[in-house]
Image: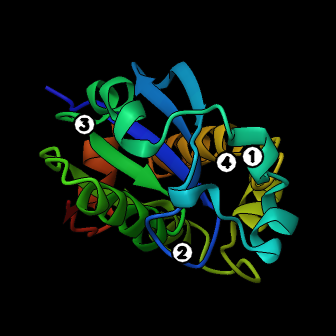
Amino acid sequence: MPQRWVAIDFETASRERASACALGIAVIDGGGIVEERSWLIQPPGNYFEPMNTRIHGIDADMVWQEPEFDEAWAEIEPYLQGAVLLAHNAPFDIAVLRASLERYGLQAPEVAYHCTVSMARKVWPRLVNHQLPTVCEHCGIELCHHDAASDAAACARIAMRCRRESAAPDLDALAVSLGLRAGRL
């Protein structure tokens, strides 16, 4: 039986990995996205570095009434528990998730993860690069880059497009056919 796959994307308020200020998810089931969700999150001390705000447009005024990560976790965790996570540049997003869980002393869920950058490199090796905007443009996927919900949905669509182009019956089979080993949270 295929596993449940969930694409995630974090935006951070500073260079600190435990400074999540937004999270987007896209749940994949039956070959399509069945749910998209996003959260604004107040980072520790509601501190933002100007460079990060320039990238994603989120600032302290936008999140001062939003929950911190530990308060939002009760809503987020059910989406991740038992899923296989996808992220475009997974080392970054998984590091943010790990650091946020550690900062607040929260138990990490049992999840595996894959990186859609790795998938895209194997399926489209001749692209000039495999950054999210480049892969989305190649695939004709709409993207509002650095909007966590849009980035997560684009990540999910990239994985599904890789699956179709590789003629894999599902994402589990895609990972095997591409020789990708899952990371573990």
**Marking on residue 83:** 3
Q: Earlier in the sequence, mark 3 or mark 4?
A: 3
Report the front residue among 133 and 30.
133
The answer to whether residue 140 is seen in the rendering is no
At 46% from the left and 62% from the top, the residue drawn is 93
Identify the residue position indicated by label 4 in the image. 151
How far apart in space, not on screen, are marks 1 and 2 (Cα)?
Answer: 23 Å
Identify the residue position indicated by label 2 in the image. 121
In terms of secondary structure, where does tag 4 sit? Answer: helix
Q: Amino acid at mark 1?
A: Asp
How far apart in space, not on screen, are marks 4 and 1 (Cα)?
Answer: 6 Å
Q: Quadrant of the C terminus?
A: bottom left
Residue 144 x/y as whole percent = 83, 46
How far apart in space, not on screen, are marks 2 and 3 (Cα)?
Answer: 23 Å
Identify the residue position indicated by label 1 in the image. 147
Q: Which mark lies nearer to you, 1 or 2?
A: 1
Q: Which mark lies nearer to you, 1 or 3?
A: 1
Q: Amino acid at mark 3?
A: Ala
With respect to residue 115, does 57 lie above or below? above
Report the front residue among 89 and 170.
89
With respect to residue 34, does 56 lie above or below? below
How far apart in space, not on screen, are marks 2 and 4 (Cα)?
Answer: 18 Å
Q: Are marks 4 and 1 in contact (CB under 8 Å)?
A: yes
